[in-house]
Image: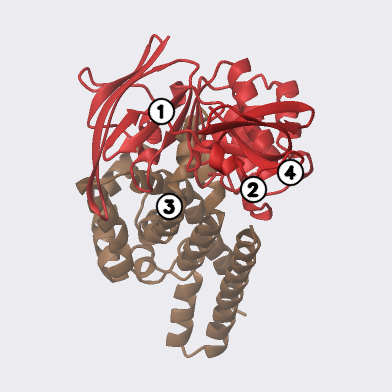
Chain colours: A red, B brown
Amino acid sequence: MNFSISIFHSFSTLQGIQKIEANLNLNVGDFVSISGVSGSGKTTFLKILCGLIQPINGDIRFGNQFWLDTQKGLLLSPQNRKIGMVFQDYALFPNMNVLDNIKFAAVHPLDKIFLRDIIDTLGLTDLLTRFTYQLSGGQQQRVAIARAIISKPRLLLMDEPFSALDEALKKSVQSFIYELHQKFFFTTLIVNHQISDIKAFSTKFLKFEGEKLVDYQPKLEYDFTVEGIIISKEIGNPEMCQVTVSYQGHTYRIPFPAKEAERLQVGDTLKFGSYCR
Amino acid sequence: MEENFLETIFLTLKLASVTTLILFFLSVPIAFYLSRSQGFLKSFLEIIITLPLVLPPTVIGFYLLLLFSPGGSIGIFFKQLFDVNLIFSFPGLIFGSIIYSLPFMVQPIYAGLEKIPVQLIEASFLMGKSKWQTLFKIQLPNCMPAIYTALALTFTHTMGEFGIVLMIGGNIPGETRLASMAIYDSVEALNYQQANQYSLILISITFGLLGLVHFWRKKTFKR
């Protein structure tokens, strides 16, 4: 099933008129990463998908359902799109505690097992009776994530959802979201400054080039580095040399320029990196 | 203490309570409309609502007198439909107070609704909630300090109403004689002790109410 987006929108900002244009063909079930410089229109794009902003012209079709067709004057209300959204500033309701915030977003009848699962995974068990003003930024962000996924939305939109989480929590929340994405067949669009955070999960990458939102393939980047022990060094040709490194019982062969390899000895430790893609 | 002292105080509190209650239910939809709309109609409505704030009460009272009198359009309507005289009567005072105190209820609630971050409303819509569900579950609960202020201002302002009461209510004990009129009468009769008694009661109630609002606001702002 397709999730096709073809929109054009322009709006005035303090810097002048800003335009957004997107012609995209996504698949329902995609995990999409969106990047772009600050002020490029990422949040506005998400709000257009939600139906909170009506673009000047265009159409959006999610599977067999038209969400927007400006030619025909069709606009499906945000209430009927079944979207879960994590707002950049969380948008938690100050008059409700954490549990009520999450329950307010849930559909009836409440799936109590799923609610418990979300609360446990996001580490909210001890925070349920707290009000939002009693939470740190990271805690508020986790509540916002819980609130966005409790209704098992068709489309999950997340605007900088991991910015206030520490590294350890970030990894577990990312894995949990990806697990849910697969389990409930969400279509997930994440706006993130650090593409490396979600690169491993993403099936599609979009970025703003000027006013246009376009597909792109991110450059390969180091995902992690480890330290291993050199167990052998083989000279292949006068130019290149192959160094075999042992790390946690596995061996890795790393090609090296012969000149560079001269200073390496068997038994030395060597830091080396792994690529994410 | 004058014979009708308690009756006058009771009538003043009754008028303030009834006016505040009616105005609350009337003002929430008006403030909601103002907070969501743009354009000419909004500006026009805002000006109309602000008028009682800046016009001399006697001006409003004069026109209400014309409209409420047995020959006036509203006067005829109420006489024929409900057999109620609006002029020099308690129902007439309620109508006058509603018009006179309207800005004191609408403006704080409108300002409170305007202050609510738009993201909260958007988040509620995305959770499938309607405009009215969002108003009652999110917007109004999150502008409680503004609502407390609106209730207290309307109540105390209605309690101290004088100009309109003078024009359309008169000074009928048990029917239209309010504390503010009683103070005026007492001073005219050089009965300063009685004027003092009425004034102290008004000051105490007003002070107590504003204190209560201050306490509630502080408690709510802690969040």
Q: Mark 2: which secondary structure?
A: helix
Q: Residue B188 location, x and y as percent? A: 42, 86
Which residue is labeled 1 in the image?
A217
Answer whether residue A97 is visible to the viewer in this image: no
Q: Distance from label 4 to label 3 (Cα)?
A: 98 Å
Q: CA distance from mark 4 to mark 2?
A: 41 Å
- Quadrant for the N terminus of chain A, please: top left
Q: Which residue is mark 3?
A: B91
Q: Are callouts 1 and 2 both on one chain?
A: yes
Asked if badge 4 and badge 2 are on a common chain, one would say yes
Identified at 22% across, 17% down, the residue is A72
* Residue beneath the point at 76% across and 33% down: A120
Label 2 amino acid?
Gly
Q: In the image, is residue B48 above or below residue A238?
A: below
On the picture, is A172 further left or further right than A91? Answer: right
Mark whose residue sits in front, 4 or 2 = 4
Q: Chain of mark 2?
A: A
Viewer-side residue, B126 vs A3: A3
Sequence-wise, the earlier of marks 4 and 1 is 1
State how far apart marks 1 and 3 are (Cα): 74 Å
> To which residue does mark 4 refer?
A268
Chain where mark 4 sits: A
Q: Chain of mark 3?
A: B
- Mark 3: few/some/many CA within 10 Å (<14, 14-19, 20+): some
- Which residue is drawn at the image coordinates 67% and 52% (left, top)? A135
Which circle's residue, 1 or 2, is located before the other in the chain? 2
Residue type for callout 4: Asp
Residue A256, quarter of the rendered image: top right
| Residue annotated with mark 2 | A138
Q: Nearer the viewer, mark 2 or mark 3?
A: 2
Q: Which mark is residue A232?
A: none
How far apart marks 1 and 2 lie (CA) works out to 30 Å
